[in-house]
Image: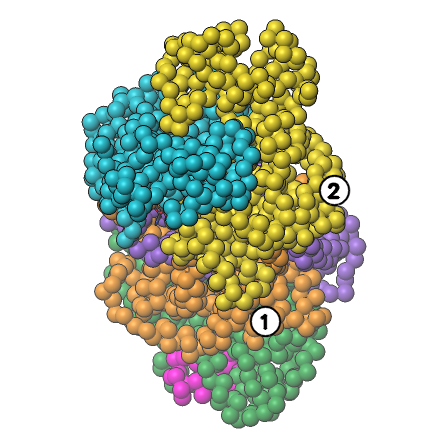
Chain colours: A green, B purple, C cyan, D orange, E yellow
C-alpha cells in the first residue's frame, strides 16, 4: 500500500481533480492519495523549502513553468519518462511541452496551461459603435478604453493588474513590454529598464489606467479585477485565459452572455502581450514512490482524465491549455467559445524566445532564474507606485533599473 | 516575603521557562548567525561559501531599507497609539454595567479571532475597495466620492486594518487589569472630591500603567513583524509606501530563498527590535517594577 | 454648615436587612460617635451617609437638602476608611495632598497643609514612602491625614485609631477633637474604644443589629442606659446583670451593677459572696471575675493592685445608689 | 461596590457599548453574511444586507473539499496543547518574578520578550532542518512545541502583570497555613487570578490558533490545523469570496465558543475584602 | 514544643535598620505580648519569626533549632495578619479550613473543627459568606479563626482584636487565653491595648525603635519600669513626668507619678496646684488634664464621676510610695 501526498494549488481545476481521486484509487487499489491544497504563495514557499532541504514531505508537487527549468537543472525533479504508452506526449501543446521540458526531457506533466488575452464587453462595444479586431493593437485598446469609460455610470474602459508582485502586475507588464519590444536583460544580463521601449510601455500603461482605469487599480490583482469585470464595471480586461471560463459562467458573472475575446494587444512588432503559464505535476528527486507518483501524474494529465471530467462535470470544466486534441474536440469547442483564442494565445507565446530582441533567459512574463522573484517584486512595487501617482514613470524606471542591477551584481550575473 | 527561601524556590520555578527559552533563542540564533555569514541560496545548494559581512552590507545598503525602517516605525507607533487610545476607553466602557455584556465583550474581542490574511482580505475587498467596497457604497449614499484607500493612503489603510485586529488585545488586557482595581480606592478618591475624570487620571490610569506597558511591549513585538496584512493588501506598494522591514526581508530574501541574506535581515531585525524595545523600556519600563 | 439628618434610612444587601430604619439628627458642628457590636452596621451607615452605598429606603439630609441622589464627590464630606483604602501608587504626601489637589488649591498651600498634617500625625519622616512600606499604624495615620487635611462639611471616621498604640491614640484623640472644634466641622466617628467614645463624643449613637438603641450624651448613656443592651454595651468591663429573687427585691426583672460599683471586700460581711475565678492585674486596676453561685459570674473592678488570686473568697457589695433596674422587656425602669 | 448605577447611565453605557461593539464586529458580521451568499452576491453593489438568497452551499462545498473536522481537531489539540503547556511553565515563572523579584527580574522579562524578536522567516530554514532531522515535520507535538515556545514569553508577561496586582499578604497567609508552593499556586494564586488567567488563556489560544507561519510551513496533512484549511481558500485564481468566508466562519466558530466561556471568567473584584 | 529564642536578630529594609539586634527567650507554652509605639517593628519581628522575611543578622531558634533557613510553611507556626490577608475567593468556612486541608486532615474532622472555631468567634451565621461581604470586625475574626483552628507550635497574633467592640474583645481575649492555656501552645501577641497586654501576657516585651526596652511580667513593668520610655508607655493614661527642682528634692533627675496615683482635691491644701484644662468623663472614671504651671500638664484619674470643669482649680497630691525616680539617662533608680 502506497500513500501519495500531493501538494497542489487551490485552483478550481485542481480541486476538481481532488474530487475525482476516487476514480484513480479505484483503478489502483494499492495507492492512497492525500491532498495538501494551498494558496499559491504558501504552496510555493512550502514546496520549495521541502525540496531544497530534502524534507520528503511530498510525493507529487504542483509547480509552475517558472520552477520547472530551475529545479530540473538542479536535478531536484525526476524526469517523467515512464508515463505509459498511451500517454501520448506528442499530443501536448508544443509551447507548453517546451516550458516543462529541459534538454528535451519532460520534468513535469502540464495539468492546465494558460496565456493571456483580452476579454471585453460586446454590449458596450456595440453601444459605442466599436468593433474589436481579433488581434487588436495597443493603440486601438487605448483609444477604445478611453471611449468606453463612463465614470458616472461606474464603468471603466479597462481593468489591468496593478498590485505589486512578480506574479501580479509584473506578469502583465512584462508581457506588455514584450509586445513593445522591451526586454528585462540584454544578452549580457544587463537590465534594460532605461530603454525607450520600457518607457513607452510604462507610460502607456500609466496614462491608460489614469484615464480609463478603475480607482484603486494599484492594489488590484487578478481576483479584484475578476470581481470588477463580473460585476460589470470593466469594458475590457486583459488577463489570464482561464478567466474566460469564469467571466462566461452565469453563476459567477453578471455579464456572462456579453463577453467577447481577442488576442492580447500588440504593437506590430511581432509579439503579442501574452504570457505563458502552466501548472504542472512533478515528482521530487529522492522520492521512494516514483512509480506510484508517475502513475498518478499520468492519470491526472491524460486524455482520459479530460474525458472523465467531461463526463462528470461537463466539457466546460475540463482543464484547458495542455493538449492539442482538446482543441480539436467539437464538444469542447461548442461550450468554450474562447477555446480557439486560448489556443492561439498559447501558441503566440514562446518562452524560449519571448521578446523581439534576443535575451539570455527563458520565460515570457518572467525570467527563469532564482533571483527573479525578488527582483520582480521590487520592480513591481516601483511600477505600482508609478500607477498610483506617488512617483513618476521615469523615477520608477530608474529605481527599477538600479534595484535590478544591484541584485544581478550580487547574484554574480554582471560585475 | 522576599526571603532567601522563596528566592531560591523562585529561581527554581523560573528555570524551566528560562532554560526552554534560552535554547529556543540560542539554537536558531547561532544557526542564523552562521548562515548570515554564508553565501547560501536554498535553490542552489552546494555552493555555500563564507562571505563575511557581505550579506549585512547588502541588506543595509538596500535603498528600500531606510524607507521600510520608517514605515515600520510609523506603523508600529500608529497602531500602538490607536489601540491604546481607543483600548482604554473601550475597556472602561466594558467595565460598566451593560445589558448583554458578555455578548458585547465577545463582539469586541472577535476581530482577534480572525486570521490576519482573512481579515486583510475582508477589509480590502469587501469594505475598502473603491469600486465594490461597502465604504464606497456608503460614501456614495451620502453623495461623496469614494475614498481610494490603498492608492491614496496605503500605509494608513494598512494601519487601520492592523489596529482593528489588535484593538481587542489591548482592550482585553486592560479590561482584565481593571478588574483588579480596588473599588475602595475609587471610593476614597470620590470622597476626596475627585470628579470622574480626575479619578480616571489619578487612580485608574496609574493602575493601568503596568498593563499598558505590557500591551505596548507585546504589541510592538508582533507589529514589528507584520507581514500577511501587507502582502495581501498592497504587496508592499505602491512603491515602498507600505514596505516594512518584515516585508523587505520577505521580498528580498525569502522569495529568492537566499538564506544568507534572510539570516542577515533577520539579525538586523532583531537588533532593530531590541533598540525599539530598549527605548520603550526607557519610557515605560519603571512600571514593571514593584 | 454640616447638619446631617437621617430619616428612616434603610439598607439591604439582597435579602439581608442591614440597616432597619435609622432616624437621627446630627447638629452642625457636633461630634457624634457610633458604637455597636461588630457587624451591627456602623460602617454601612457611614457609607450611606458618604453616598458610597445607595439607601434602600428613607432619606439623608445634609443641611436640609436630601442628598440621596448626590454623588459622594458632591456631598462635601471626607472619610477615613476602616480598611484605609490608600492610593498604593502615591507617596504618603501624594495620598494626603490628593483631596486638596482635587479642590484646586495652590501648590504652596497644599504643601504647607500636608506638612502640617503630617507633623500632627507624626508622619513627617515617611512623607515620601509608598503605603506598602509603612507599618499598619502608619498607614492608618495616612488615612486620617487624608481626611483631616481638607475642610469638609463633615468628617466620617471609621475606627481611625484602632491600630495605634495607647500613647499615640491619646494624642490623636486630642488632636482630632481639637481640630474638629477649631474648624467647627461636624464629625461622625465609629469606634470600639470605650474611652474614645466617652471622651470625644458630644453624643453617642448605640447601634445594634441595624437599629439605633439609644442616642444621647456619654454620661446619659452611662448613667441612664435606655435598656439592657445599652447598659451592657457601654462601660468596660461590662455591667453585671442579676435576675431572679434578688432582682425582684430591688424592683426589676433584671438589675444591673457596673463592676466599678461593686465594692470588693476580703471575706467581708454583707453583699454578695463568691470565689475569685480570674483576677486580672492591670496595675492601675484589678478586675475580678467572681463566681457568685446562683448569681452567676460577676465582674468587679478594684482600683489599684489587690493581691487576690483564683480561689480566694470575696464579698461584693453593690452601691445601692448605682443599681440599674430593667423590666421584663429589657427597658430601663427609672425611679 | 454597591451603588446602583442609575438607569439612565446604564442605558447610555449599554447603548454605547452595543454601538461600539457592533461597529467593531461589523466586518466579521459582514464576512459571515457573505458566507451565506452566492459568490456573485458577495460582491454585488449595492450590497444586500439580509434580503438575499440565503444559501449554505458554500459550507457544503467547503466540507466536501477539505475535512474541516480533521483540521479543527488538530487546531484544538495544537492551540490548546501549546497554550496549556505554556501556562504550566509560565505560571510558576510569573509567580517567581512577580512575588520574588530581584534586581535582574526586569532584564529577564525583557530578554524573554526578545526571544520573540527574530522574524520567523529568518529562521525558517534552520528550524525546518532541525525538524526534519528529529522527525518532527507534520507532527502535532512538533507544532505544539514551537507554538508553546513562541507564546511562552507572552504568557509569562501577561501573567506577570496580573500577579503583580494581587496583594502578597494573601500568599504569605497561605504559606503560614502550611501550604507548599505548589498548593499555594493551585489553591490561592490561581483562583484569585482567574480574570487574568482567563484573558491570558484566551488571547494565547487565539494567537496559537491563528499562527500561520509555522503551522503552514511545518505541517503537511496529518497535523495540519485550520490555518492550512484556510490557506486552501484564499485562492489567487477565481472568485472565492463566499467560500473563504464560509471557511473562515468555520475556523472562527470553535474559538468563539471557547471565547464565550473564557471571557465570562473576567468577573469583577475577586480580591475585595481580603486585606485591610 | 514551642520554645522560641531570638539571638541578636537584625533586620534592615535597604539602608533602614528596623530591628537593631533583638535577644529574647520565649518559654514553651508562655504567652508573650509585644507592645511598642506604632512603627517600632512589632510586625516586622513577628514576620521574622514566621519566616516571611529573612533576618539580616542573628538567629531564630524554635525548640533549639535554628530556623532561619526553614521556610514559613515548615516552621509550624500560625499567624493572624494585621491586614487579615483573607483568601478572597474562599468562603469563611474555606478560609478557616484551608490550613487544616493543607495538613491533610480528614473532611469530617475539618468540619467539626471549623464549626467549633466559628462558634467561638460568633461567626457561625457567616460561614458561607465571602470576605467581601463581611464587616471589618467579622473579617478580623475570620483571620483569628484561621490561626486558632490549627495546632501549631506557636501562635503569632498581630493586633488580632483591634477592630472588635469592647464586649466581644473581652470575650475573645478570654477565649484566646483559654485556648492557649488548654493547648499549651506558645503565643506571641502584638497589641496596642493596655488591658489586653496586662491581662493576657505572662510576659510583656516593650519595643521601641527596633530595640527591646524591657522584658518582664506585666506588673513588673507597671511597678518597676526599667526606664522613662517603659514608664511612659505602660499604663493609660500615661505617667506624669516632672523634672527640675521638685524632682531633685525627690532624688531623681525626673520623677514620675501615674495619673491614678494623684489624689484630686478641690482646691485642697498641699500637693501640686493647677487649673483643670480638660475633663474627660468616662462614667466609671474621670480623667483630668491639669495645667500645673511650672510642672507642666499633669493628668489625673479620679474614680467615678467628678463634677469638675475646665477652669476649676484643683490640687493634686501624689502618693509618696508610688513615685518613680529616674536618673539623667532616663534609667530607673530603685531604692
Ligand atoms: N518595605 C519597607 N521598606 C521600608 N521600611 C519599611 C518597610 N516595611 C516596614 N517599614 C518600616 O519599618 C518600621 C517597622 O514596621 P512594622 O510594620 O514592623 O511596625 P509595627 O511595630 O508593626 O507598627 P504598627 O503598630 O503601626 O503596625 C516602620 O517604621 C515602617 O515604616
Ligand atoms: N456585601 C454584603 N453582602 C451581605 N452582607 C454584608 C455585605 N457587606 C456587609 N454585610 C453585612 O452587614 C453587616 C454590617 O456590616 P458593617 O460593615 O456595617 O458592620 P460594622 O458595624 O462596621 O462592623 P465592624 O465593627 O465589624 O466593622 C455585617 O453583618 C456584614 O456581614
Ligand atoms: Mg465596620
Ligand atoms: Mg504592625
* Boundaries of the magenta span: A301-326
Q: Are marks 2 and 1 in contact (CB under 8 Å)?
A: no
| Residue located 68% across and 21% down the image | E334
Q: Which of the 4 image quarters holds residue D103?
A: top right
Q: Chain of mark 2?
A: E
Res. D19 visible in picture? no
Observer-nearest of A292 and B87: B87
Q: Chain of mark 1?
A: D
Q: Residues within 10 Å of mark 1 (few under 14, many from 20)?
A: many
Quick one: which residue is furthest to the right in this view?
A: B50
Residue ID for mark 2? E59
The reply, left or right, for residue D117 in relation to residue D76 is right
Q: Secondary structure at mark 1?
A: helix
Q: Is mark 2 within 8 Å of ligand 1?
A: no
The reply, left or right, for residue E240 in relation to residue C204 is right
Q: Which mark is residue D140?
A: 1
Observer-nearest of E68 and B128: E68
Q: Residues within 10 Å of mark 2 (few under 14, many from 20)?
A: many
Amino acid at each position: 500500500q502506497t500513500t501519495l501526498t500531493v501538494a497542489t494549488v487551490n485552483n478550481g481545476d485542481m480541486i476538481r481533480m481532488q474530487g475525482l481521486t476516487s476514480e484513480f484509487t479505484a483503478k489502483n487499489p494499492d495507492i492512497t492519495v492525500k491532498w495538501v491544497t494551498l494558496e499559491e504563495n504558501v504552496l510555493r514557499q512550502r514546496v520549495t523549502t521541502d525540496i531544497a532541504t530534502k524534507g520528503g514531505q511530498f510525493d507529487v508537487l504542483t509547480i509552475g513553468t517558472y520552477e520547472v527549468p530551475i529545479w530540473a537543472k538542479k536535478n531536484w525533479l525526476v524526469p517523467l519518462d515512464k508515463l505509459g504508452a498511451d500517454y501520448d506526449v506528442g499530443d501536448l501543446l508544443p509551447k507548453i511541452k517546451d516550458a516543462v521540458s529541459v534538454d528535451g526531457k519532460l520534468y513535469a506533466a502540464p495539468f492546465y496551461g494558460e496565456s493571456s488575452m483580452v476579454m471585453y464587453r460586446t454590449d458596450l462595444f456595440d453601444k459605442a459603435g466599436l468593433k474589436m479586431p481579433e488581434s487588436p493593437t495597443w493603440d486601438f485598446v487605448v483609444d477604445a478604453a478611453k471611449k468606453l469609460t463612463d465614470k458616472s455610470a461606474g464603468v471603466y474602459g479597462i481593468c489591468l493588474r496593478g498590485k505589486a508582485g512578480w506574479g501580479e502586475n509584473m506578469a502583465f507588464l512584462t508581457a506588455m513590454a514584450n509586445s513593445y519590444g522591451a526586454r528585462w536583460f540584454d544578452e549580457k544580463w544587463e537590465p534594460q529598464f532605461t530603454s525607450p521601449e520600457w518607457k513607452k510601455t510604462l507610460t502607456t500603461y500609466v496614462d491608460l489606467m489614469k484615464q480609463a482605469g478603475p480607482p484603486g487599480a494599484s492594489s488590484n490583482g487578478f481576483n479584484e479585477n475578476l470581481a470588477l469585470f463580473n460585476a460589470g464595471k470593466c469594458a475590457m480586461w486583459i488577463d489570464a485565459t482561464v478567466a474566460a471560463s469564469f467571466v462566461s459562467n452565469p453563476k459567477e458573472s453578471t455579464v456572462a452572455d456579453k463577453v467577447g475575446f481577442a488576442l492580447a494587444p500588440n504593437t506590430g512588432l511581432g509579439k503579442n502581450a501574452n504570457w505563458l503559464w502552466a501548472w504542472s505535476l512533478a515528482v521530487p528527486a529522492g522520492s521512494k514512490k516514483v512509480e506510484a507518483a508517475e502513475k498518478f501524474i499520468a492519470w491526472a494529465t491524460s486524455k482520459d482524465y479530460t474525458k472523465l471530467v467531461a463526463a462528470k462535470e461537463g466539457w466546460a470544466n475540463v482543464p484547458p491549455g495542455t493538449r492539442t486534441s482538446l482543441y480539436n474536440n467539437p464538444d469542447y469547442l461548442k461550450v468554450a467559445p474562447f477555446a480557439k483564442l486560448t489556443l492561439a494565445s498559447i501558441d503566440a507565446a514562446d518562452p524560449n524566445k519571448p521578446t523581439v530582441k534576443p535575451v539570455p533567459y527563458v520565460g515570457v512574463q518572467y525570467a527563469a532564474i532564482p533571483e527573479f522573484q525578488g527582483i520582480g517584486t521590487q520592480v513591481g512595487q516601483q511600477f505600482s507606485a508609478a500607477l498610483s501617482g506617488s512617483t513618476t514613470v521615469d523615477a520608477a524606471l530608474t529605481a527599477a533599473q538600479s534595484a535590478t542591477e544591484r541584485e544581478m551584481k550580487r547574484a554574480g550575473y554582471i560585475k | 516575603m522576599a526571603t532567601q527561601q522563596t528566592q531560591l524556590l523562585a529561581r527554581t520555578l523560573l528555570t524551566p521557562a528560562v532554560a526552554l527559552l534560552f535554547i529556543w533563542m540560542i539554537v536558531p540564533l547561532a544557526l542564523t548567525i552562521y548562515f548570515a555569514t554564508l553565501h547560501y541560496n536554498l535553490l542552489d545548494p552546494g555552493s555555500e561559501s563564507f562571505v563575511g559581512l557581505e550579506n549585512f552590507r547588502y541588506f543595509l545598503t538596500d535603498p528600500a531599507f531606510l524607507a521600510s525602517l520608517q514605515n515600520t516605525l510609523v506603523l508600529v507607533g500608529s497602531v500602538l497609539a490607536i489601540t491604546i487610545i481607543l483600548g482604554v476607553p473601550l475597556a472602561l466602557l466594558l467595565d460598566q454595567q451593560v445589558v448583554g455584556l458578555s455578548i458585547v465583550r465577545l463582539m469586541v474581542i472577535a476581530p482577534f479571532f480572525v486570521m490576519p490574511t482573512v481579515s486583510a482580505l475582508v477589509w480590502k475587498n469587501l469594505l475598502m475597495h473603491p469600486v465594490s467596497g461597502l465604504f464606497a457604497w456608503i460614501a456614495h449614499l451620502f453623495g461623496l466620492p469614494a475614498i481610494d484607500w490603498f492608492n491614496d493612503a496605503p500605509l494608513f489603510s494598512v494601519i487601520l486594518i492592523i489596529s482593528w485586529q489588535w484593538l481587542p488585545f489591548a482592550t482585553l488586557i486592560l479590561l482584565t487589569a481593571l478588574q483588579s482595581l480596588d473599588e475602595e480606592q475609587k471610593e476614597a478618591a470620590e470622597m476626596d472630591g475627585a470628579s470622574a475624570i480626575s479619578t480616571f487620571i489619578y487612580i485608574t490610569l496609574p493602575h493601568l500603567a503596568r498593563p499598558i506597558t505590557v500591551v505596548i511591549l507585546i504589541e510592538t513585538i508582533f507589529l514589528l513583524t507584520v507581514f500577511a496584512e501587507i502582502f495581501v493588501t498592497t504587496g508592499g506598494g505602491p512603491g515602498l509606501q507600505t514596505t516594512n522591514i518584515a516585508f523587505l526581508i520577505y521580498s528580498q530574501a525569502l522569495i529568492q530563498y537566499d538564506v544568507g541574506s534572510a539570516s542577515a535581515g533577520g539579525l538586523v531585525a532583531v537588533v532593530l527590535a531590541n533598540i525599539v524595545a530598549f527605548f520603550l523600556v526607557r519610557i515605560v519600563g519603571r512600571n514593571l517594577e514593584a | 454648615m454640616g447638619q446631617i439628618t437621617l430619616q428612616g434610612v434603610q439598607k439591604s444587601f439582597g435579602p439581608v436587612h442591614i440597616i432597619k430604619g435609622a432616624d437621627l439628627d446630627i447638629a452642625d458642628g457636633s461630634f457624634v460617635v457610633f458604637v455597636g457590636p461588630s457587624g451591627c452596621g456602623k460602617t454601612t451607615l457611614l457609607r450611606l451617609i458618604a453616598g458610597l452605598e445607595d439607601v434602600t429606603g428613607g432619606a439623608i439630609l445634609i443641611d436640609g437638602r436630601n442628598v440621596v441622589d448626590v454623588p459622594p464627590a458632591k456631598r462635601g464630606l471626607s472619610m477615613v476608611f476602616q480598611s484605609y483604602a490608600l492610593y498604593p501608587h502615591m507617596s504618603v504626601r501624594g495620598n494626603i495632598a490628593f483631596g486638596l489637589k482635587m479642590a484646586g488649591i495652590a501648590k504652596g498651600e497644599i504643601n504647607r497643609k500636608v506638612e502640617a498634617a503630617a507633623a500632627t500625625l507624626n508622619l513627617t519622616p515617611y512623607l515620601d514612602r509608598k503605603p506598602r512600606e509603612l507599618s499598619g499604624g502608619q498607614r492608618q495615620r495616612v488615612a486620617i491625614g487624608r481626611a483631616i487635611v481638607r475642610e469638609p462639611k463633615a468628617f466620617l471616621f471609621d475606627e481611625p485609631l484602632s491600630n495605634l498604640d495607647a500613647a499615640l491614640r491619646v494624642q490623636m484623640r486630642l488632636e482630632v477633637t481639637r481640630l474638629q472644634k477649631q474648624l467647627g466641622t461636624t464629625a461622625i466617628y465609629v469606634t470600639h474604644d470605650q474611652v474614645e467614645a466617652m471622651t470625644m463624643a458630644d453624643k453617642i449613637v448605640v447601634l445594634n443589629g441595624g437599629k439605633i438603641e439609644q442616642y444621647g450624651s456619654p454620661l446619659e448613656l452611662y448613667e441612664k442606659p435606655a435598656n439592657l443592651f445599652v447598659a451592657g454595651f457601654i462601660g468596660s468591663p461590662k455591667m453585671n446583670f442579676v435576675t431572679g429573687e434578688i432582682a425582684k427585691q430591688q424592683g426589676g426583672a433584671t438589675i444591673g451593677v457596673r463592676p466599678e460599683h461593686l465594692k470588693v471586700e476580703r471575706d467581708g460581711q454583707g453583699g454578695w459572696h463568691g470565689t475569685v475565678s480570674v483576677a486580672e492585674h492591670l496595675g492601675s486596676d484589678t478586675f475580678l471575675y467572681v463566681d457568685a453561685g446562683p448569681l452567676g459570674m460577676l465582674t468587679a473592678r478594684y482600683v489599684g493592685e489587690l493581691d487576690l488570686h483564683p480561689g480566694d473568697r470575696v464579698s461584693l457589695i453593690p452601691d445601692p445608689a448605682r443599681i440599674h433596674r430593667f423590666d421584663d422587656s429589657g427597658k430601663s425602669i427609672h425611679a | 461596590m454597591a451603588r446602583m448605577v442609575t438607569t439612565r447611565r446604564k442605558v447610555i453605557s449599554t447603548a454605547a457599548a452595543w454601538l461600539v461593539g457592533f461597529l467593531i464586529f461589523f466586518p466579521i458580521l459582514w464576512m459571515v453574511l457573505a458566507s451565506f451568499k452566492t459568490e456573485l452576491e458577495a460582491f454585488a453593489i449595492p450590497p444586500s444586507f439580509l434580503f438575499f438568497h440565503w444559501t449554505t452551499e458554500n459550507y457544503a462545498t467547503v466540507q466536501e473539499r477539505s475535512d474541516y473536522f480533521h483540521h479543527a481537531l488538530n487546531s484544538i489539540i495544537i492551540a490548546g496543547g501549546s497554550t496549556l503547556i505554556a501556562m504550566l511553565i509560565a505560571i510558576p515563572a510569573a509567580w517567581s518574578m512577580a512575588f520574588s523579584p530581584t534586581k535582574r527580574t526586569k532584564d529577564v522579562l525583557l530578554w524573554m520578550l526578545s526571544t520573540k524578536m527574530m522574524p520567523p522567516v529568518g529562521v525558517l530554514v534552520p528550524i525546518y532542518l532541525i525538524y526534519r532531522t528529529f522527525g518532527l515535520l507534520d507532527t502535532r507535538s512538533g507544532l505544539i512545541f514551537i507554538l508553546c515556545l513562541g507564546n511562552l514569553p507572552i504568557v509569562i508577561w501577561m501573567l506577570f502583570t496580573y500577579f503583580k496586582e494581587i496583594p502578597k499578604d494573601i500568599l504569605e497567609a497561605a504559606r503560614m497555613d502550611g501550604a507548599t508552593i505548589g498548593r499555594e499556586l493551585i489553591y490561592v494564586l490561581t483562583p484569585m487570578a482567574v480574570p487574568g488567567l482567563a484573558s491570558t488563556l484566551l488571547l494565547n489560544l487565539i494567537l496559537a490558533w491563528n499562527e500561520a507561519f509555522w503551522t503552514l510551513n511545518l505541517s503537511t496533512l496529518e497535523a495540519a490545523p485550520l490555518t492550512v484549511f484556510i490557506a486552501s481558500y484564499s485562492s489567487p485564481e477565481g472568485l472565492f469570496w463566499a467560500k473563504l468566508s464560509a471557511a473562515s466562519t468555520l475556523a472562527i466558530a470553535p474559538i468563539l465558543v471557547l471565547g464565550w466561556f473564557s471571557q465570562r471568567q473576567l468577573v469583577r473584584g475577586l480580591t475585595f475584602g481580603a486585606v485591610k
